[in-house]
Amino acid sequence: MQENTKKPRIGFCLLAGVLAGFINGFFGAGGGMVLVPLLIWLGKLEDKAAFSSAIAVILPLCAVSIAVYALHDSLPIQDALPYLLGGAAGGVLAGLLFRKMPAKALHLILGGVILAGGLRLIVC
């Protein structure tokens, strides 16, 4: 953690969690894209700590979203299964590369992914 920082107020933490949970549940992804900057700005976490902390927060958020979708018969598990093995392999690879990646590169990659996704959604 950076020197001379105060812990964020609980209200900011709850707001960041609500925003990340809503984005993640509503769009099926993207909670981490909201959470990473909030963890840096509000949580005063170092960049790499914010990226890895977002992963720890998003996992339970995804579990809650899965449960809600399943309760409302909106979980097409058969459509998602073919992507599970590749997604797991990508997660392992990213986890291994994360330690070697400078924080600046992580910011550029995340920004590029957000920009490309945003452009794709606007154009289509």
Image (cartoon, rainbow, N blue to C red):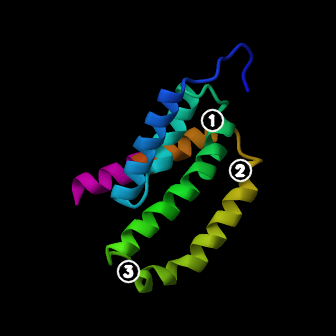
What residue is drawn where x is 32% and y is 75%?
A: 74
Q: Say which of marks 2 and 3 sits in front.
A: 3
Tell me which amino acid carries mark 2: Phe
Q: Nearer the viewer, residue 81 or 100?
A: 81
Local crowd size for mark 3, using a 10 Å CA cut-off: few (<14), some (14–19), many (≥20): few
What residue is drawn where x is 50% and y is 83%?
A: 81
Question: What range is drawn magenta here?
Answer: 115-124
Q: Nearer the viewer, residue 3 or 103?
A: 3
Task: Give the position of the C terminus as an image quadrant.
Answer: bottom left
Task: Give the position of the N terminus as an image quadrant.
Answer: top right
Q: Residue furthest top?
A: 4
- Which residue is label 3 attached to? 76
Reply yes or no: does residue 24 show up in magenta: no
Q: Earlier in the sequence, mark 2 or mark 3?
A: 3
Q: Say which of marks 1 and 3 sits in front.
A: 3
Q: Could you tell me residue 40's position as x and y percent?
A: 57, 30
- Which residue is label 2 attached to? 98
